């Protein structure tokens, strides 16, 4: 899924790179082996290439630059309320550009939003558009739980199509025990949710127990999170 999203992003910004899924797999496997395997993350980065002048139009006849490296990551979360660290978040008006569905390195808006929360002692910042609708967090997608149903904003140009987000939706729907909705989520719904989660490849499903200093639900990690993380942990390597 990550490579498919990268290919979609390259097409969206007009970068032509004739690499197959096998080419990417070989690069990733080589990096993992040469760095001793273990609990590693992989960072993949493609730019348009280098030119000898500064000009806003796309340069012609240059080859894309591919940059990749591995980095150590923390062990994956365990589906156990007593062993997972709950997060607290801040909120902010979403002031980023209107092409957030493209995963690019132009992340100044995201960085500034993350810093906003960081300076308040928060782990993330939830973002809301001008209509007080939830978009995403500065580096994560967002889910809420209300009355046993899991709800997440419908994808559009204001949200990155997160890989973990999609896996969570898939495993919950395949299990069939918990309702999943993709729709507009309002600020009031977030404030009155029973549970709130943020999702990303490194965090997996992280439970939120405090927003802007106020407790989420009863202030404890919820049972629906436990069910979702259990299903995710069992299925994530199938993707």
Image (cartoon, rainbow, N blue to C red):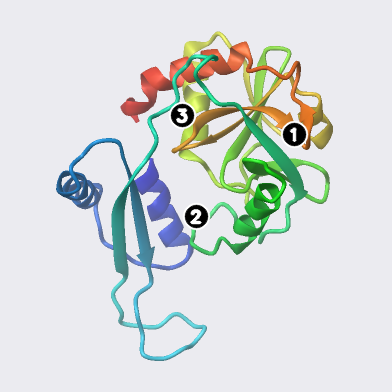
Q: Earlier in the sequence, mark 3 or mark 2?
A: 2
Rendered location of residue 130, percent (x, y): 82, 51
- Against 113, residue 179 (above or below) is above
For label 1, the residue is: 211
The kind of secondary structure element at disc 1 is strand
Q: Is residue 230 left or right of residue 113?
A: left
The kind of secondary structure element at disc 3 is helix
Rendered location of residue 44, percent (x, y): 34, 55
Q: CA distance from mark 3 to mark 2?
A: 18 Å
Residue 73 in view (yes/no): yes
Residue 99 in view (yes/no): no
Q: Is residue 160 left or right of residue 148?
A: left
Q: Earlier in the sequence, mark 2 or mark 1?
A: 2
Q: Are marks 3 and 2 in contact (CB under 8 Å)?
A: no
Residue at horizontal 35 percent and vertical 80 percent from the top: 50
The crowding category of the residue bearing disc 3, from other C-alpha atoms within 10 Å (few below 14, some 14 to 19, many at least 20), is some
Q: Quadrant of the N terminus?
A: top left
Q: Are marks 3 and 1 in contact (CB under 8 Å)?
A: no
Picture quadrant where residue 91 is located: top right
Q: CA distance from mark 2 to mark 1?
A: 26 Å
- Against 156, residue 173 (above or below) is above
Residue at horizontal 17 percent and vertical 48 percent from the top: 26
Residue at horizontal 55 percent and vertical 15 percent from the top: 81
The kind of secondary structure element at disc 2 is loop
Q: Which mark is residue 167?
A: 3
Q: Nearer the viewer, mark 2 or mark 1?
A: 1
Rendered location of residue 196, percent (x, y): 67, 27
Hey, which residue is sitting farthest top in the picture? 177
For label 2, the residue is: 103
Q: Nearer the viewer, mark 3 or mark 1?
A: 1
Rendered location of residue 121, percent (x, y): 68, 43
Q: Quadrant of the C terminus?
A: top left
């Amino acid at each position: 899924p990550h490579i498919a999203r990268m290919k979609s992003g390259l097409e969206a910004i007009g970068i032509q790179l004739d690499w197959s899924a096998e080419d990417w797999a070989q690069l990733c496997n080589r990096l993992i082996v040469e760095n001793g395997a273990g609990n590693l993350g992989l960072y993949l980065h493609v730019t348009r290439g280098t030119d000898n002048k500064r000009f806003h139009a796309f340069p012609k006849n240059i080859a894309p630059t591919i940059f990749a490296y591995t980095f150590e990551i923390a062990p994956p979360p365990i589906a156990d309320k007593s062993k997972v660290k709950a997060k607290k978040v801040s909120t902010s008006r979403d002031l980023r550009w209107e092409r957030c569905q493209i995963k690019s390195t132009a992340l100044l808006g995201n960085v500034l939003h993350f810093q906003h929360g960081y300076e308040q002692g928060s782990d993330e910042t939830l973002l809301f558009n001008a209509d007080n609708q939830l978009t995403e967090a500065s580096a994560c997608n967002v889910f809420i739980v209300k009355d046993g149903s899991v709800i997440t904003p419908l994808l559009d140009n204001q949200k990155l199509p997160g890989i973990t987000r999609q896996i969570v939706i898939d495993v919950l729907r395949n299990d069939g025990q918990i309702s999943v909705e993709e729709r507009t989520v309002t600020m009031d719904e977030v404030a009155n949710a029973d549970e709130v989660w943020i999702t990303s490849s490194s965090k997996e499903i992280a439970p939120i127990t405090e927003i802007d200093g106020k407790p989420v639900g009863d202030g404890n990690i919820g049972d629906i999170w436990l069910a979702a993380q259990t299903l995710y942990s069992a299925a994530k390597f199938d993707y």
